Image (spheres, coloured by chain):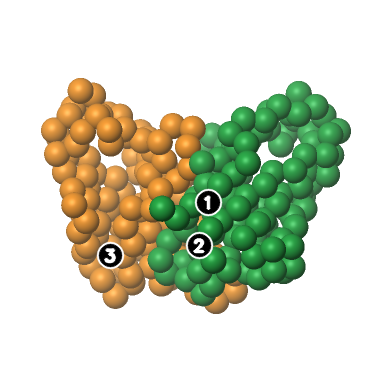
């Protein structure tokens, strides 16, 4: 069964901490994405990557960075966590050049910043 | 920016009834996709309809697409309690980011 795996389901961090969210896919997908999901706002794209070491800003990149050193792994980094980054974070992947076949999502990481 | 807008935002029906959710969008698209999200989990891809298709079926799901009205509908027939979830439409437009844009979702509750 193909999978996108997010390293943590729940995470609690303190304000100012550097936070790493990890995502691994086993489908050899070129594209990987990080979204955050908030009530009433839906899914908002933070960053995406279409190849190793490549990254593109999404709609809300401020306060975040990403790293893609290997094809299967895409990390989201909160440089200095703030309470307004409390959210559900969703990782997804797809083949290059396709929204064509849909995205495969991980189970999500619910991050609380206190 | 959000492309798709689902309607209604919340829907409550009895088990066995049909559930219809609608999605409107603003610009031309290559395809439209529907996803389901169970509470606190990730999204699961349900069905994709291309811009040159008008209707598509998958099991108890029926999706229609009207590109002239920039709208789509998702029909779930003979609903079950396990269908309780949020449903999102997502539009795909090639070029530029080649990314999918999600709506805010419809929360469906199926009462046993």
Residue A39: where, in percent of width, then height? 54, 34
Chain of the residue where label 3 is placed in the rendered structure: B
Q: Are marks 1 and 2 in contact (CB under 8 Å)?
A: yes
Chain of the residue where label 2 is placed in the rendered structure: A
Residue B81: where, in percent of width, then height? 24, 29
1 or 2: tag closer to the N-terminus: 1
- The residue shown at (19%, 36%) is B79
Mark pair 2, 3: CA separation: 33 Å
Residue A114: where, in percent of width, then height? 76, 23
The local crowd at label 3, few if under 14, some if 14 to 19, many if 20 or more residues have their Cα within 10 Å, is: some
Q: Kindly identify which residue carries mark 1.
A: A4
Q: Which mark is residue B66?
A: 3
- Which image quarter holds the N terminus of chain B? bottom right
- The residue shown at (18%, 48%) is B60
Give me the chain that's green.
A
Q: Is residue A88 left or right of residue A100?
A: right
Q: Which mark is residue A27?
A: 2
Q: Is residue B99 above or below residue B4?
A: below
Whether residue A105 is visible, yes or no, is yes
Label 2 secondary element: loop
């Amino acid at each position: 069964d193909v999978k996108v795996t997010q390293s943590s389901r729940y995470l609690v961090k303190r304000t100012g901490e550097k936070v790493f969210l990890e995502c691994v896919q086993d489908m050899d997908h070129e594209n990987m994405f990080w979204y955050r999901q908030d009530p009433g706002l839906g899914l908002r794209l933070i960053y995406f990557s279409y190849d190793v070491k490549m990254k593109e800003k999404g709609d809300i990149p401020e306060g975040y960075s990403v790293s893609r050193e290997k094809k299967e792994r895409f990390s989201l980094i909160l440089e200095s966590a703030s309470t307004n980054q409390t959210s559900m974070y969703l990782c997804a992947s797809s083949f290059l050049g396709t929204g064509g076949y849909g995205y495969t999502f991980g189970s999500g990481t619910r991050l609380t910043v206190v | 920016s959000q492309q798709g807008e689902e309607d209604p935002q919340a829907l409550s029906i009895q088990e066995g009834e049909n559930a219809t959710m609608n999605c409107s969008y603003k610009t031309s698209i290559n395809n439209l996709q529907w996803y389901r999200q169970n509470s606190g989990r990730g999204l699961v891809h349900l069905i994709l309809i291309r811009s040159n298709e008008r209707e598509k079926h998958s099991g108890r799901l029926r999706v229609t697409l009207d590109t002239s009205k920039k709208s789509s509908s998702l029909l779930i027939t003979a609903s079950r309690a396990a269908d309780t979830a949020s449903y999102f439409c997502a539009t795909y437009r090639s070029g530029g980011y080649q990314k999918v844009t999600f709506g805010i979702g419809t929360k469906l509750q199926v009462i046993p």
